[in-house]
Amino acid sequence: MLRERTLILCVCLFLLSGCVEPGSLNEERADSPPIHMSFEAPTLDRTEDGGAVFNLEETLVDGPVLMLWIGASCSGCHDWTELIRTSMDEGAFNNSTINVVSVHRWAQYESLEDVEDTFGVESNQTHYTPWTVVTPSLTTPTYEFGTKDATGYPLYEAYGNPGTPTLQLIDQAGALVWQSKTYWANETLLLEAITFFDEDGS
């Protein structure tokens, strides 16, 4: 009788081996990304980028971040880049603590060389980007702001799979508070972003 029970137990263990609850194979995540998020990703690693790695939470210590989602072959992205750069040169950001960051959106289609040639070369008068250019991958993770706990959402999905160009304003707590998907550069919209926190009273 003992041998029979032992045999049955061994058979059951054999049949059940490898049976794992489906949810345990994937990192658990909420139904939607958290409101307050951060991420870390490589940059083009130029002098203008301030280092080889960009960390959103660390950058937000100095002020809100205006993220411009870009693609190398996106004409609207070139247009927005030129407007923002010209506005900086003309002093539009002088009284603002907002930091501008460009984030490459199409890692699956465009190479780092494409991004570098389009936005990273100073001799490229219309597209040159004198601020940080972030070059994430499809799997770049996001984290809950302040805890560094993984959200389970990769960067693109966490920020709504934005088309290009898209501008997103992130407050100092890591929350997306303003967004524009207007394709061609618009001075009124850029001013709205720059003065958002002035109008908000914060």
Image (spheres, rainbow, N blue to C red):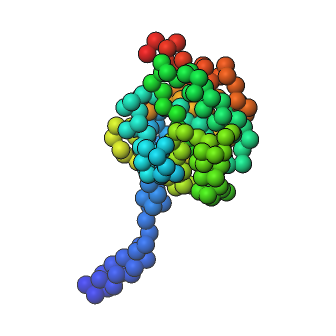
- Residue visible at 59% across and 56% down in the picture: 112
Q: Name above or below for residue 6 compared with residue 158.
A: below
Residue at the limit of the structure toward the left, as seen here: 2
- Residue visible at 41% across and 33% down in the picture: 60
| Quadrant of residue 50 within the rendered picture | top left
Residue 136 percent location from the top left of the image = 53, 51
Instruction: Name the one closer to the observer, 38 or 190.
Output: 190
| Quadrant location of the N terminus in the rendered image | bottom left
| Quadrant of residue 193 within the rendered picture | top right
- Residue visible at 60% across and 32% down in the picture: 85
Q: Name above or below for residue 192 compared with residue 66.
A: above
Residue 53 percent location from the top left of the image = 43, 49
| Quadrant location of the C terminus in the rendered image | top left
Residue 12 visible at all: no
Q: Name above or below for residue 90 compared with residue 161.
A: above
Q: Name above or below for residue 5 compared with residue 170.
A: below
Q: Is residue 15 left or right of residue 2?
A: right
Instruction: Name the one closer to the observer, 123 or 67.
Output: 123
| Quadrant of residue 67 within the rendered picture | top right
Q: Is residue 192 left or right of residue 53?
A: right
Residue 81 percent location from the top left of the image = 64, 36
Residue 199 visible at all: yes
Instruction: Name the one closer to the observer, 49 or 124.
Output: 124
Residue at the limit of the structure toward the bottom, as seen here: 3
> How many labels sit on residues?
0
- Residue visible at 72% across and 44% down in the picture: 74
